Image: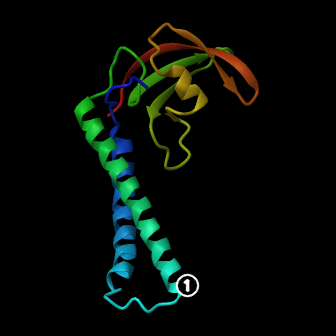
């Protein structure tokens, strides 16, 4: 996006915190299965392979937890989203080529289908990032290339 710390919306923060809680619970369940090994190394190859698989899963969970914790820290450092250019956390009203206008929230994650939420990594979201009120832009839709313009923008909670 900008290369610096990116703001994070309250909705995205809550979703990330839920994901972190789930990952920590999953990590604890996997870690418990690794703790009971003790000094007995007489298991067969299947036992050793299972142990290696659980260890690999623990590493994956640790990496994902660290990534999400880092994103939360970055969002806290970045402060609120800019109100002069579209970014994560912005509320933006877009006028499409057919003249219709729709207001969207630019977010990082979508937990469920929300027609008012556009993720920053979607085609429309990528086309909007960095735009200002009055900018006209093109982006690709399933129906082909289209043009739209930014009518206004602000911040979401």
The image shows residue 57 at horizontal and vertical percentages of: 46, 66
Q: Residue at x 36, y 59 (%)?
A: 62
The image shows residue 58 at horizontal and vertical percentages of: 40, 66
- Give the colouring mode of the picture: rainbow
The single residue placed furthest to the top in the displayed view is 134
Quarter of the image where one finds residue 30: bottom left
Viewer-proximal residue among 82 and 60: 60
Q: Secondary structure at mark 1?
A: helix
The single residue placed furthest to the front in the displayed view is 42
The image shows residue 133 at horizontal and vertical percentages of: 45, 10
Tell me if 6 is positioned left or right of 103 in this view: left
Viewer-proximal residue among 32 and 84: 32
Q: Residue at x 49, y 81 (%)?
A: 48
State which quarter of the image contains the C terminus: top left
Tell me if 130 is positioned left or right of 140 in this view: left
Asked if residue 79 shows in the view, the reply is no
Quarter of the image where one finds residue 100: top right
The residue that mark 1 highlights is: 46
Asked if residue 51 shows in the view, the reply is yes
Local packing at callout 1 (Cα closer than 10 Å; few below 14, some 14-19, many 20+) is: few
Q: Residue at x 57, y 33 (%)?
A: 122
Q: Does residue 155 sit above or below 119 in this rendering?
A: above
Q: How many marks?
A: 1
The image shows residue 22 at horizontal and vertical percentages of: 38, 63
Q: Residue at x 45, y 78 (%)?
A: 51
Tell me if 21 is positioned left or right of 94 in this view: left
The single residue placed furthest to the right in the displayed view is 143
Q: Does residue 144 sit above or below 157 in this rendering?
A: above
State which quarter of the image contains the N terminus: top left
């Amino acid at each position: 996006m900008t290369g610096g710390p990116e703001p994070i919306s309250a909705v995205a923060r809550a979703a990330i915190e839920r994901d972190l809680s789930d990952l920590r619970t999953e990590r604890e369940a996997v870690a418990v299965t690794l703790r009971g090994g003790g000094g007995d190394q007489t298991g067969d190859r299947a036992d050793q392979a299972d142990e290696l698989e659980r260890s690999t899963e623990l590493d994956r969970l640790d990496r994902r937890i660290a990534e999400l914790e880092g994103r939360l820290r970055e969002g806290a450092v970045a402060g609120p989203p800019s109100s002069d250019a579209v970014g994560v956390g912005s509320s933006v009203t877009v006028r499409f080529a057919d003249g219709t206008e729709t207001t969207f929230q630019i977010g990082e994650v979508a937990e469920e289908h929300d027609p008012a939420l556009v993720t920053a990594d979607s085609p429309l979201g990528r086309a909007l990032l960095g735009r200002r009120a009055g900018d006209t832009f093109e982006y690709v839709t399933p129906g082909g290339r289209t043009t739209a313009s930014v009518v206004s923008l602000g911040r979401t909670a």
